[in-house]
Image: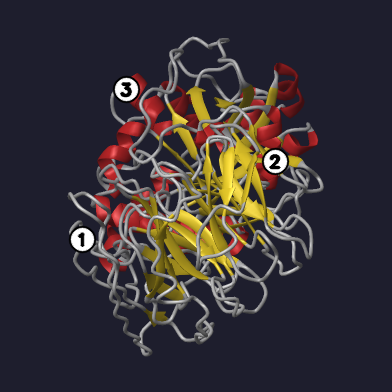
Amino acid sequence: MTDPNALVLNTLERKPLHVRRRPFLSIAVLTFALLVPAAPGHAGTIPEPTSTASVKKDAPAAEPSGSPTAGSERRGGTVAAEPSVETSTSPSKPTAPTPTSLPTAGANEPAAPSPGPSTSESAGTTLSEEIGELGSYMGQGLERLKETGNAQTPTDRDRALDEAVDELGLKGAELQFGASAPSNAAAASSWRPTGIQGLDVSSHQLTVDWQGAYNQGARFAYVKATEGTGYKNPYFSQQYGGSASAGMIRGAYHFALPSLTSGAAQANYFIDGGGGWTADGQTLPPLLDVEYNPYSSLGNDCYNMSASQMVTWIRDFSNTVLARTGRVPMIYTTTDWWNRCTGASQAFSDHPLHLAAYNQAGPGTMPNGWTTYTVWQYSATGPFVGDSNVWNGTSNQLAAFARNSGIETGQQGATGPNEVHFRGGVPASSSMGLSSDKLLTCDWDGNGVSTPATFYGGVWIIRNSLSSSDPGFRLSYGSGTDQPICGDWDGNGTETIGVYRNGVAYVKNSNSSGFADGVIVFGAKGDTAIVGDWDRDGNDTLGVARPSTSGKQFYLTNSNLRPSVAGSFVFGNATDVPVSGDWDNDGYSTVGVKRGSQWFLANSNLRVVTNVTYAYGDTSDAPITGRWARGRATSVGVVRAR
């Protein structure tokens, strides 16, 4: 292994870094290409990259996907279709992504069917009669399957309530059944799993005794607001307002009828009908109920829609909700329905999951694309009125989820927030995110102080202070496997987001969801991206690090417009974690490595030797770097999972 003090390879003296380059363009959307060797896999030394570049001014830049699959449509600030990027595994030149305009539906996906005259005529009064005064409710299909074996055959409870409403009307049905609707034929259950309890209700529960539910232990609720684009829950005000008055955190849900109208149309109808969200700490994010089709007039369990049509419809709904509320919706479904009707899509892994599975053993297998759940609907027969649910996490995480603060849920499979420690910072430590989050720091607001952000599944939470009490703000950009990066790409003094994927960086000049402002091809699949102002011209540019037989190999570029290799060298051991920063506050960014709890930092990219060595953190801690106070040199920090 190579000692960081030893200079193994240095081409920077032949090709110094102090080269002015044009600032990164903030308006023109550009595409760049660089010849860089693939990650090492063959015997011998790694050849130094050479580069070519091209600029195409009349087409939009490619952009990262907001989900693991391509083909999403951008609406109102969400992340659109994933660009096609291919990186060779041999030392040949990778192909730059070709800019393309976005399709109106997902890439290679047919648009969701529109109603048209024949669809409306065929559904007509038959569908209206099926919907009736009560409509459908969350979990109806699963309840029917368990009792009757058919998602379109009513349960005994459904029949009793429908007959009472048909004969007596809603008010008469309330008088007949008292404070609650008839129960299921199955014996009521008093079992509940350990955790924060909740419930969901619809018009089928009529007027709900919310104080009674709270006294039973319920602390959150979802209330049906709308269905399709023609039905509103007549009890919504009592149920939504009553749950809040009883002290519960509550949210609204929409029952999807995806074959009738577009996802955008139903999302707008839902939000206009009570499905909005505010960061008041009492409102859960909007919930999309997408499950077994309850109406025979609309076809099979999947509404006679193909998997690609269903995915496109859900994306349309999600994009519209995000554009109007600032949050992606939680998705309610079953594993069976999701895998069958979306083709086991992984496109929504960045959305919270509300999973239905009625048993006392646990939620079971997750739908494809999710590794865990946010809420588990475990029973339709008690202990609570309506359906019974449990939150996957602590009460603090539930409150943070409602506020959208970023320290959220068991959805990410962690037990608590990360500890974040800043060497020389004030405060010296804070907490943010969960162990599965990727955390990085940058000067997000241009005030000279680096502050943290988390990245998980394409969702960012960005803070403008070091305090744990800062709720931050949320945006969507990139996908789950991307490496989040940040830098001052256009030299305006504010550092902004980007993602690095298979040798390609997709960067923005603002901290917001939206199209990439630049696509920079530099490096290869398997490289780790680093960012810095290597030549002190005020613009941050890329570098990459990769393991080699000699140690940790670095390549740096001084341009985002035409990214040629300005220098390459080996520093540290192959297994070290690369970092970058202005360690001596001279305006030049230089490299370093973290090895276990030891840090080795260099103050020059011309003669790369270790200038500073110290211990900070533990071996398992992830490194971060930043300026923890205005005017100071870059310091180090660590993220420690809990």
Check disc 3 and report the residue beneath it: 148
Compared across the picture, whether 318 is left or right of 35 comes to right
Q: Amino acid at mark 1?
A: Ser
Q: Is residue 138 visible?
A: no
Residue plotted at (47% across, 72% down):
515
Percent position (x, y) of residue 531?
52, 63
Q: Earlier in the sequence, mark 1 or mark 3?
A: 1
Q: Amino acid at mark 3?
A: Thr
State how far apart marks 1 and 2 are (Cα): 38 Å
Compared across the picture, whether 279 is left or right of 548 comes to right
Percent position (x, y) of residue 343?
25, 45
Q: Amino acid at mark 2?
A: His
State how far apart marks 3 and 2 are (Cα): 56 Å
Viewer-proximal residue among 204 and 252: 252
Check disc 1 and report the residue beneath it: 88
State how far apart marks 1 and 3 are (Cα): 54 Å
